[in-house]
Amino acid sequence: MIALLGIFTNACSSYDLRDLLQEDTENIESESVEDNQNQQKAEAPAADTWQLEKPQREQLSVGKYAYEHLDEQGQVIYDEMLTAILNHEEKIRLSTTDLDLMRKAYTAVCGDYGGLFWVEGYVFTRYTKGEELVSLEFAPKYTMSEEERKITQAQIDEVVEIWMNGISINDTDYDKAKYVYELLALNTEYVQDATDSQNIISVFIKQQTVCQGYACAVQYLLGQLGIQSVIVSGTALGDAHAWNLICLDGEYYYMDATWGNNGYRNKEGLETSFIDYNYMAMTTAEMMMGHVPDGEIELPECTAVMNNYYIKEGTYIEEWNPEWMGAILSDAWTQGQVVTLRFSDEILKKQAFQYFIEEGYIADYCDGITEVNYIEDNMWKEISFCFN
């Protein structure tokens, strides 16, 4: 009897080849395929009959985005996998022999649960009788023991409690999203080679992460505040990337916290960081300007704009009103902040640029200003005034 072993990674993984086979006069073959294409051989028990015990299943994810977009059978497999992961089980036999369904269900689990820091993929083993696939085993690949998991979770909980002191479950959905977006931009550094970068350990314990860590943390924190969200995978500017789909006041938006932490250099060459709110609550059209989802999770067409940062904060300019814009600039100047004006069309942006910057009328609103650091963004039709 031959068992070929395989690992799939995406946010969880690990497995062994013991099962419920009892003596069988027929030849039973067990096979599993690894994500890295490496194949190992393992011994499958001699058997007589298959004891197809139904895996334990807990329905924990009703209302979760990716879960709700699976069919009924997919939800069953999702529940089985999630239950095994949460219970730190070594392996389970799935209620399916459909490999595509298994992979789809696992992707959905990882999309809905950004807090599964103790797993990094899985190994599956398939058992065949002749040419017939008769059973699939699923084993999470754990990165730590249950005791280590408990210790790490306590460390994460301690940090999260401190970070979330400034927001309440009773605040508006917009305020919750803005708070989490700013929280991650101000407290987490993007570091390409950060350790544990594919999970929330990198964010809450080490404060250094990459896009996957940011996306997991967004899902985890918004979940604490009762906001539905899911992790979206794909590419951004041609590179592998992860971001989020979030639901605010019953309408969907995209959030990319990785790109929220931006910066600029002044004329002396000094680097100054600021929060870029373009990526806090995007429509599908805005998201697609730089992002391409991989299609693994069904996504809605996002057209809502009422929770767009610039509309909500009153810095979206739809008509020429220099006094209004001047008041916004004056307030930002007084507080030493970066403020971004987004314009409804290019003509308005050019008019504002000429008036405030080229003709210098910004001095009428910003007392004592002698130079202007600004960023002009033609794609978003924006001018950012950097007073920090």
Image (spheres, rainbow, N blue to C red):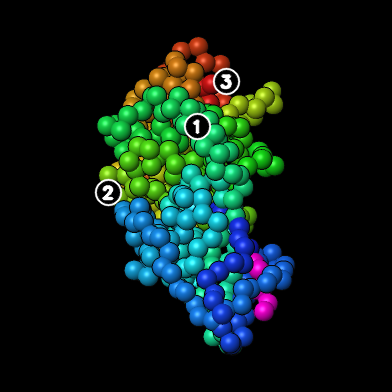
Q: Residue at x 35, y 37 (%)?
A: 225
Q: Tell me if residue 206 is in the magenta stretch.
A: no
Amino acid type of the residue tagged 3 in the rendering: Glu
**Left or right position of 27 against 332:** right
Q: Residue at x 59, y 44 (%)?
A: 145
Characterize the local packing of mark 3: few (<14), some (14-19) or many (20 or more) Cα atoms within 10 angstroms.
few
The answer to whether residue 312 shows anywhere in this view is no
Percent across and percent down for residue 310 are 38, 37
Extreme residue in the top direction? 368
Amino acid type of the residue tagged 1 in the rendering: Ala
**Left or right position of 79 against 337:** left
Q: Which residue is mark 2?
A: 250
Q: Mark 2 vs mark 1: which is more N-terminal?
A: 1
Mark 3 element type: loop
Q: Give 22 or 373, whichever is nearer the viewer.
A: 22
Q: Which residue is mark 1?
A: 154
Q: Give 345 or 238, whichever is nearer the viewer.
A: 238
The answer to whether residue 227 shows anywhere in this view is yes
Compared with 30, 247 (above or below) is above
Q: Mark 2 vs mark 3: which is more N-terminal?
A: 2
Compared with 133, 102 (above or below) is above
Nearer the observer: mark 1 or 3; the answer is 1
Amino acid type of the residue tagged 2 in the rendering: Gly
Mark 2 element type: loop
**Magenta-highlighted residues:** 1-6
Q: Give 252 or 382, whichever is nearer the viewer.
A: 252
Q: Tell me if residue 4 is in the magenta stretch.
A: yes
The Cα–Cα distance between marks 2 and 3, rounded to whole angstroms, is: 44 Å
Residue 371 tag number: 3
